[in-house]
Amino acid sequence: MDIILNNASGVPIYEQIEEQIKGLMMTGELKAGDALPSMRLLAKELKISVITTKRAYEDLERDGYIETIVGKGSFAKAMNSELMKETMLFATQELMEKAVDKALMGKVSLEEMLEMLEIIYEEKKSN
Amino acid sequence: MDIILNNASGVPIYEQIEEQIKGLMMTGELKAGDALPSMRLLAKELKISVITTKRAYEDLERDGYIETIVGKGSFAKAMNSELMKETMLFATQELMEKAVDKALMGKVSLEEMLEMLEIIYEEKKSN
DNA sequence: AAAGTGTATATAATGAATATACACAATATT
DNA sequence: AATATTGTGTATATTCATTATATACACTTT
């Protein structure tokens, strides 16, 4: 499982795991019914405690993304991609608002921001 | 002093204070030499502990935004507006990158994002 | 002296992350 | 079929860092 932890980011480990698994589900790399790595295996791979992977999986289950069965493992559930896009659109919007707040403080113009956005988007898209 | 705390945001109180005072300095509402509210007064206004306002003011002093004199109070320092713009530009960029990450997960197109940005920018600018 | 300012110490409350021992399910071995 | 083994998730108690606090102290101005 391709999960990359960034310890310097300040974002809790369990949250990074949650976001990235949601990401894999949304891009289709993880389909409904697919098994997720076991809590133990993922913990070993990431060199963290099982309790932290459990915390992430618990949250994902609570929010309806996955299903966990004792003794068997955890599995991706089917997701409503309409709803998903709405969710991401909303999250995008919130972050964009914060970015604009900073920009206005620094008298960064709309043109500068638009250009910045294009560059970042193309850059990230090609990765 | 117009500082608004958002307890639900998860952002530490002292950090919210720091950001908003920086904001006031950048927009010119707080000029070099101007007195900031005393730690006690601000604490009283915000209904928080003096130690929390002190923590904010300490950080601001460490980062060169203000100067604090025992028995007298805290005062805004002159700021290098070139450097300031650089700082804000950098912060803007980091937030924009996070926004793009979310957008790509949800298959939000560049065009959608550009439009979103324009709307948010104009909206916030007029406030 | 009084009332304003900032400061220092010890402490409580919360949340992230952990180690370790426990319980359940599938599979291999006999 | 019985059972040992290995793999799965679970629960408890604990450590650690960060945020926020109460309260008593020290300096400056009036």
Image: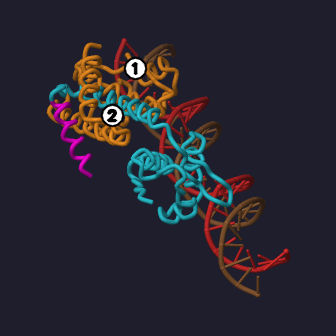
Chain colours: A cyan, B orange, C brown, D red
Q: Chain of mark 1?
A: B
Q: Identify the mark at residue B3; answer none if there is no mark.
A: 1
Residue C25: x %, y % from top left: 71, 61
In this picture, residue B122 sits left or right of residue A90: left
In this picture, residue B116 sits left or right of residue A2: left
Residue B9: x %, y % from top left: 47, 30
* CA–CA distance in space, label 2 to label 1: 15 Å
Q: Is residue A82 above or below residue A28?
A: above
Q: Is residue B25 above or below residue A63?
A: above
Q: Residue at x 24, y 29 (%)?
A: B114
Residue B21: x %, y % from top left: 33, 25
Residue designated by label 2: B60
Range of magenta residues? A112-127
Quadrant (top left, top right, bottom left, bottom right) of the N terminus of chain B: top left
Within the image, what quadrant is residue A117 found in? Answer: top left
Comparing labels 2 and 1, the label whose residue is closer to the camera: 1
Secondary structure under tag 1 reads loop
Q: Amino acid at mark 2?
A: Leu
Residue closer to the observer: B51 or C27:
C27
**10 Å crowding of disc 1: few (<14), some (14-19), many (20+):** some
Q: Chain of mark 2?
A: B
Q: Amino acid at mark 1?
A: Ile
Q: Is residue C1 above or below residue A71?
A: above
Within the image, what quadrant is residue A61 found in? Answer: top right
**Would you say the magenta stretch is mainly helix, strand or loop?**
helix
Within the image, what quadrant is residue B98 found in? Answer: top left
Q: Identify the mark at residue B18; answer none if there is no mark.
A: none
Q: Are marks 2 and 1 in contact (CB under 8 Å)?
A: no
In this picture, residue B64 sits left or right of residue A76: left
Q: Residue at x 55, y 55 (%)?
A: A53
